[in-house]
Amino acid sequence: MGQAHQLVQMRLGITAILLGLIALLITGTGSVIAVSLAVSPESIESGQVQLTEPCPALVSGEPCWSCGMTRSFTAMSRGRFATAYAYNHGGPWLYALNLLALLSLSWLWAWVWRTEFLVLWQNLRRDAPAAR
């Protein structure tokens, strides 16, 4: 087995790790969007669904920067932008960034798969010594 073959194998392994890391990030961002699609803001407000613990800052009467973020995300998933903004002013922006990250990471995964992984795999199979 030549040095070029070993380099292709190593690059293929690194590419596989990169694809795995991108897939992990896609899973994280995608799960946030999926949960916000599955739960309504009304079910959170009524107490029917509790995704997070109540904010300890509510005891003091001062809301923190993340108060209402979950309800804001669920409202955004339903296209209720004004309601989402009312729950948390940063919620719509963070939701948009999360959605952009999900789409960008999905595109990146597909691009790395197509341009790196498949090409390396084909080169490795083509250059592999024939089995006897």
Image: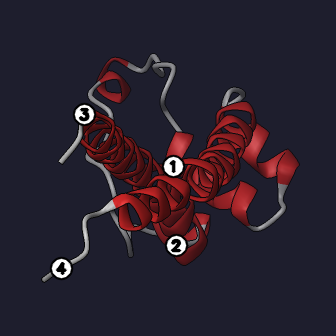
Q: Earlier in the sequence, mark 4 or mark 2?
A: 2
Q: Residue furthest left?
A: 132
Q: Earlier in the sequence, mark 4 or mark 1?
A: 1
The reply to whether callout 4 and callout 1 are in contact (CB within 8 Å) is no
- Residue 56 percent location from the top left of the image: 26, 28
Q: Give how far apart the Cα atoms at labels 4 and 3 are.
A: 19 Å
Closer to us: 77 or 65? 77
Q: Which residue matches tag 1?
A: 70
Instruction: Name the disc covering residue 131, or none.
Output: 4
Residue furthest bottom in the image: 132
Label 3, on which residue?
3
Give the label, 1 or 3, closer to the camera: 3
How many numbered circles does the render carry?
A: 4
Q: Position of residue 101 (x, y in %)?
A: 63, 40
Q: Secondary structure at mark 3?
A: helix
Q: Position of residue 78 (x, y in %)?
A: 76, 68
Q: Residues within 10 Å of mark 3 (few under 14, many from 20)?
A: few
Of the numbered discs 2 and 3, the one sitting upstream in the chain is 3
Marks 2 and 1, how far apart at CA: 10 Å
Q: Which mark is residue 103?
A: none
Mark 1 neighbour class, 10 Å CA radius: few under 14, some 14 to 19, many 20 or more: many
In the image, what residue type sits under mark 4? Answer: Ala
Q: Residue at x 42, y 45 (%)?
A: 25
Q: Secondary structure at mark 2?
A: loop
For label 2, the residue is 39
For badge 1, the amino acid type reads Thr
Q: Are marks 4 and 3 in contact (CB under 8 Å)?
A: no
Viewer-side residue, 119 vs 38: 119
Whether residues under marks 2 and 3 lie with C-beta atoms below 8 angstroms apart, the answer is no
Compare marks 2 and 1 and give the one earlier in the sequence: 2
CB under 8 Å between callouts 2 and 1? Answer: no
Instruction: Look at the image and tell me in which quarter the C terminus lies.
Output: bottom left
